[in-house]
Every structure is written in structure tokens, then in C-alpha cells.
Image (tube, rainbow, N blue to C red):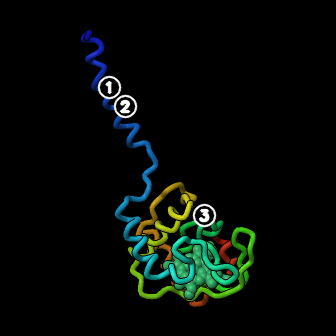
Amino acid sequence: MSTRFLSLIPCLAVVALCAEDAKPAGPSAEVMKRGQAVYSRTCIACHQPTGMGLPPVFPPLAGSEWVAMSASIPVRNILQGMQGAVTVKGVTYNSMMPPVAGLTDRDIADVVTYVRNSFGNAGAESGSEVTEAEVKAIKAKYADRKTPWTADEFKKDAK
Ligand code: HEC
């Protein structure tokens, strides 16, 4: 082996490390596990273990354009609930989701991360993890909001 080649080895190692770093940081297995536990406690009865919902009453989270649109939408669904007509994957639902009580900011971050990265969903901000800080910011932004959201409101302001 020439010394020239040997001197390349550290460079190759650096390139390999950088390539590793460049991969989009998907949610950690730990966050997904915690999110799944929250989902099983709080969403599963309506949205089902498969995330497919129960048409025509409970809409799916799997492949939902609302889940893909932003992390804020599912967070606000949890905080204030949702009512009125909403079209999900071409089917119109017209029902009511009550606010989900008793969750910490961490629980909300975890379950929204889980939903946006499960059931064939890949987060719109590609594979990203929703943080507790983001949940706190959304909570603060909508602190005065007391009534359930509507699909029209989500369309006007998805953040
Ligand atoms: C009691 C039943 C119920 C529970 C529990 C519930 N949801 Fe919902 N959810 C609904 C219904 C019904 C709608 C549609 C409301 C409407 O028609 O306006 C909905 C709508 C949604 C939507 C927007 C529409 C869609 O299909 O993407 C999201 C996102 C959502 N829920 C997320 C959640 C998450 C996350 C949880 C758990 C933390 C949860 N829901 C718990 C019943 C429920």
C-alpha cells in the first residue's frame, strides 16, 4: 500500500462521518415509542390502531392531508378539538373531536411526532420531530382560544 493511499484514509473517514450527519434526523425510536403509548391511551378509540379511523364518523390520520399540512394542526386538534365539516382523503366528515385533556407538552409533542411518522405518513417537514418547545409556542399563540377549530380556520392558518 502506498503512503499516498494511507494518507487518504483519515479523509475518507471524515467524509463518511459527514454523510452520516447529512441524513435527515428522523424521530428517535424512543420518541416514537413514547408517542405510540400516548396514541394508544388517547387517540386509538376513535382513529383506530391502524390510523384509518372509522368512516363515516372518525376520519383517518393515515394519509391525512391535515396531518401532513403542519404539526400545528394536530396539536390544535388536541388542545381545542375540532368540529364541523372536514374533508379527509376525499371523504367529508361532519362530527366533533373533543379536546384531549390530561396531556403534558411532552406527551403532545411525542404523539404528534408519532402520528406524522406512522401509518405511512412522513412528516411534511420530512421526518421531523415535533419538540416540546414548538408545542409550548403553539399553546401560547392560541392561549385565548376556547372553542373547537374548523377546517376553514386550519386552511386559513395552518401554523
Ligand atoms: C372521541 C373521538 C376522538 C378522539 C379520542 C380523538 N379524535 Fe381526532 N378527530 C375526531 C373526529 C370526529 C374528527 C373530525 C372532526 C370534525 O368532523 O370536524 C377528528 C379530527 C382529527 C384530525 C383532523 C382530521 C384528520 O383526519 O386528519 C386530526 C389531525 C386528529 N383528529 C388527531 C387526533 C389525535 C392526534 C388524537 C389523540 C391525541 C385524537 N385525534 C383523538 C375524533 C377523535
Residue 100 is situated, as x and y percent measured from the top left of the image, at: 50, 85
Q: Residue at x 54, y 70 (%)?
A: 50
Amino acid type of the residue tagged 1 in the rendering: Cys
Q: CA distance from mark 1 to mark 3?
A: 39 Å
Q: Alpha-carbon neighbours of circle 3 within 10 Å: few (<14), some, or many (≥20)?
A: many
Q: Which residue is label 3 attached to?
A: 68
Residue 38 is situated, as x and y percent measured from the top left of the image, at: 42, 77
Q: Which residue is label 2 attached to?
A: 15
Q: Nearer the viewer, residue 90 or 18?
A: 90
Q: Is residue 21 visible?
A: yes
**Going from the N terminus, do you reach mark 3 or mark 2 first?**
2
Vertical position of residue 132 compared to residue 44: above or below: above
Q: Residue at x 71, y 78 (%)?
A: 86
Amino acid type of the residue tagged 2 in the rendering: Val
Vertical position of residue 24 compared to residue 147: above or below: above
Q: Which residue is label 1 attached to?
A: 11
Q: The residue tagged with tag 1: helix, strand or loop?
A: helix
